[in-house]
Image (cartoon, rainbow, N blue to C red):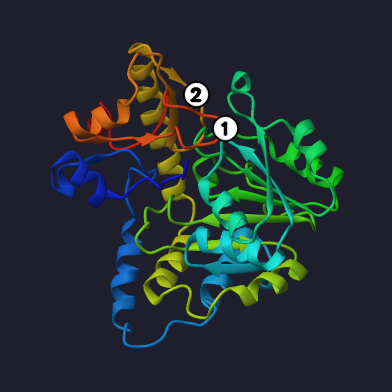
Amino acid sequence: MKQQHGGNRIHLAAQAGCQPEELLDFSISINPLGPPEPLHRAVCRAWDHIDRYPEPRAASLIAAAAKHYLLPEHALLAGNGANQLIFALTAALHPRRVVIAVPAYGDYFRSCRNIDAEIITVMAPEEHNFIPDAAILAAAATPGTMVFIGHPGNPAGTAMTPDAIRTLAGHCPEAIFVIDEAFADFIGPGFSLLPELPPNMIVLRSLTKFYAIAGLRVGLLAAAPDLIARIAPRLPDWSVNTMAIAAGRTALTMGESFAATTRSSVAALKTRLAGQLTACGLKVYPGQANYLLVRHSWEIADLPVRLLREYRIAVRDCRDFTGLDHRYFRIGLREEADND
């Protein structure tokens, strides 16, 4: 089954028979606090320069990212969201064999199918809350293999420890490990693999989710300079637009106040909603990010469809994730009243 993205509000609203603004969209996972005000001001200022081309390689955004992540500038690339970077890195490095820790984000598969790579899936055990098994991944990570690991994973929101991932990469020096940290900011200090990157590791970061700027698309890639030199030519100039550069640069220089408030709020919202769902008889997995993977055991084949058509509530149907079926769905946290 072809995997779909969440958040296609116009399509979802058409299915629900309502206007997009009437929909309660839990199918995407964006910071429920919304974008911080400094980003709004930065985007408005950037509009004054909309008649000019953006920086070809988003140099000022890269400079801000280097200071934020404590990395040299030549170890970073910026793209039109992490998605563009996923497709660029697979096209540039062109692995013949790819291992994906599943369940996982669908564009890992799409990007690898584009280059006709052999794709091997390693199912994370449900009894361990879908945390990938390092030993099984190590056995699969033969020389020349590219390994994709969500950190945290999507849709489960659970994760290996950073030390376990570093150890895994060290045991398999001839494999390349792509660690997707799109939701890592929701978890906090000490969780990211940055800045201490092994030479065979690529880390993807997204500003879209944490700073609630999905419409702008800002992604970053960190890796050893030799890998950066191979991937960079796959990115066209002007991949990141003027307003996205301004928003990203501002986000990376804001300090910890917004981040701390977000993490505290998300933790409270998640605890409350998980308790309510559990009380309804649902299985809720202990994800660390701003979304919850849920499993029901009812005799309902199309629960997400019924929620959409009867209640105008969109959740992310997870049956198209490898290893999951119609019983699973993902809920991105919203404000407390919507969650209730």
- For residue 252, above or below residue 288: below
Residue at x 37%, y 88% (from the top left corner): 52
Q: Which residue is mark 2?
A: 285
Chain-order first, disc 1 or disc 2 = 1
Locate the C terminus and report the quarter of the image it occupies. top left
Circles 1 and 2: CB atoms closer than 8 Å: yes
Q: Position of residue 319 (x, y in %)?
A: 45, 32
Q: Position of residue 74 (x, y in %)?
A: 69, 73
In the image: residue 15, left or right of residue 298: left
Q: Alpha carbon of mark 1 to alpha carbon of mark 2: how far? A: 8 Å
Residue at x 35%, y 62% (from the top left corner): 38
Q: Amino acid at mark 1?
A: Thr
Quarter of the image where one finds residue 215 = bottom left
The residue lying toward the viewer, choosing from 79 and 322, is 322
Q: Position of residue 259 (x, y in %)?
A: 46, 47
Label 2 crowding class (10 Å Cα cut-off): few <14, some 14-19, many 20+? some
Q: Which residue is mark 1?
A: 158
Q: Which mark is residue 176?
A: none
The residue lying toward the viewer, choosing from 40 and 3, is 3
